[in-house]
Image: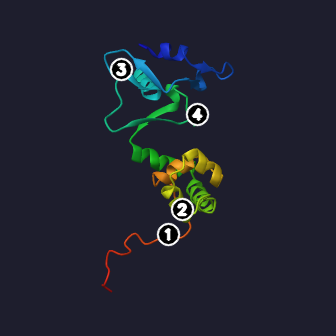
Amino acid sequence: MRTLEDLRQRCRIDPDEGDDGCWLFDHSHAYVAGAEGTGVMASRRAAWILAHGKPVKAGYRVFGKCGERGCVNPAHLRALDPAEHGRSVAASGALKGVARRVLANRAIGRNRAKLTAEMVAQINASPDTGVALARRYGVSTETISKARRSGYACHGAQTNPWAGLMKGRR
């Protein structure tokens, strides 16, 4: 794309809102051909460069103000450093309570573990195939693979990782 109009032509725009509404670009990246900022880049960054005729400052990223992820309307974009963007999001309250929900879901997930530490030990000692073990334990083959790769978190009895290192010392 060489001009902002080229980008606009490739977007879905609500006819009721006109140019003031969101320009929804269906791709995450765009190719920009021009003296400033030539190459494949994030679509919002491409829209910023086409609108302003200069690259985004070093260390800055282009963020949307409207909340629509696919929007590339230059009126809805702003270039900020990540810390400044974090302050504006915190001030708006857009993510308020999200961290609590994440922590709550993690706590609930601990009780949903399908395999105990003993089962994982049996799986690792077994010569059976992953398919046979998955049928036996009522889990997916992916869960068996994770258990064999030590990527499965058992939230039952956890042992001390330093146990046995300091034998004879108190």
Query: Residue tagged by mark 2?
Result: 154
Query: Residue tagged by mark 4?
Result: 68
Cα distance in 3D space between marks 1 and 3: 51 Å
Q: Quadrant of the C terminus?
A: bottom left
Vertical arrangement, residue 25 with respect to residue 77, above or below: above
Residue type at mark 2: give it. Cys
Report the side of 27 relative to 35 (left or right). Answer: right
Observer-nearest of 28 and 162: 162
Q: Nearer the viewer, mark 4 or mark 1?
A: 1
Cα distance in 3D space between marks 1 and 2: 8 Å
Q: Earlier in the sequence, mark 2 or mark 4?
A: 4
Residue ranking furthest to the bottom:
170
Q: Earlier in the sequence, mark 4 or mark 1?
A: 4
- The tag on residue 24 is none
Query: Residue tagged by mark 3?
Result: 39
Cα distance in 3D space between marks 4 and 1: 43 Å
Query: Residue tagged by mark 1?
Result: 158
Secondary structure under the numbered disc 2 in the rendered image = loop
Residue depicted at 58% across the width and 53% down the height: 98
Report the side of 78 relative to 17 (left or right). Answer: left
Residue type at mark 3: give it. Gly
| Residue 78 position within the rendered picture, expressed as x and y whole percent measured from the top left | 45, 34
Residue type at mark 4: give it. Glu
Residue depicted at 65% across the width and 23% down the height: 17
